[in-house]
Amino acid sequence: MHTPDAQGYIPFIHNYCDRRCERCRFVRQCRVGALDVDDVGEAEDAVADETPEDLRKRLMKLMGLSEEDMAALDAAEEEQENGPADPVEDAREKAEMAEWKREREALDRQVDAHPLSGMGSTYLDLVHAWIEAREEALKARGVQLHHRMGVDIPAELHTPEVLVLSEAVQEVLWFHTMIHVKLQRALHGKLDDDDDDPVQSDWNGTAKVCVDAVDRSIAAWETFVELLPEEADDALPMQELLRRIRKGLDAEFPDALTFIRPGFDAHMGG
């Protein structure tokens, strides 16, 4: 699972990472990461201004497709669109789609009702409200809320303490959305499990990513409170919620840490 494919990419490595591509040692061996670092420095509206031809090239690079592959896909799509309609087949497809939607809606309700899902959503909302109330004050201290948005901070504010504080805040902000999303995905996968391996399953790998995000968020909050002790009381609910999420992950996904992630956990497989 750690061996690069013919294009030099490690298969599926992007499914089990923290998506901080600019820091990843495997970025050039990841289809998603290679695209992300190529985008660094582009204008914010660059993607929106891309032509269909540009988007086609990005898809080809992401999927490792050649011009011949794309031509074959185009031909198959055209044949399907122009082919004669089959009322029986259309009815069957509609019935299957309706049944799939019913099953997905039922699964969504199960996931939403799970305590971990509720805690993840609550944590996301708490962090959003917390940073919204402090964003300007933190910036005034010289805190860089995003690694690509700090050029306007005066040089005299770039002290070692502020740099550490910036890193802690960035960790919190980066992971607060990811924790909620990954919790939902892991729960979806477990409830709708069709993997043969109970350990090397996608939902177990997703849970491992979530565990890492929670642990790093807990550490980030501890650093933040150490540097700004006046924030300790307001940070306490979020710290406690993270501890509960971590405990819930251990209970719901006891084998998560045993999952071997492509690339990242190569040492575990040898």
Image (cartoon, rainbow, N blue to C red):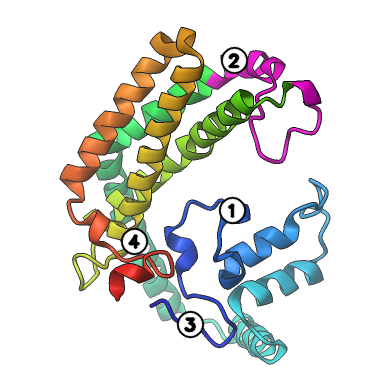
Q: Which mark is residue 103?
A: none
Q: Nearer the viewer, mark 2 or mark 1?
A: 1
Circle 4 residues within 10 Å: few <14, some 14–19, many ≥20? few
Kind of residue at badge 4: Trp
Residue 204 position within the rendered picture, expressed as x and y whole percent measured from the top left: 27, 58
Query: How many angstroms separate mark 4 from mark 1 (CA)?
Result: 39 Å
Query: How many angstroms separate mark 3 from mark 4 (CA)?
Result: 21 Å
The residue indicated by pointer 4 is 100
Q: Are the two marked residues, 1 and 3, in contact with CB atoms closer than 8 angstroms?
A: no
Q: Residue at x 81, y 28 (%)?
A: 152
The residue indicated by pointer 2 is 134
The residue indicated by pointer 3 is 86
Q: Is 59 one of the magenta-colored residues?
A: no
Residue 209 position within the rendered picture, expressed as x and y whole percent measured from the top left: 38, 52
Query: How many angstroms separate mark 2 from mark 1 (CA)?
Result: 27 Å
The residue indicated by pointer 1 is 23
The reply to whether residue 114 is visible in this rendering is no
Magenta stretch, residue numbers: 131-156
Q: Residue at x 56, y 58 (%)?
A: 24
Q: Nearer the viewer, mark 3 or mark 2?
A: 2
Mark sitting earlier along the chain (2/4): 4
Residue 268's image quarter? bottom left
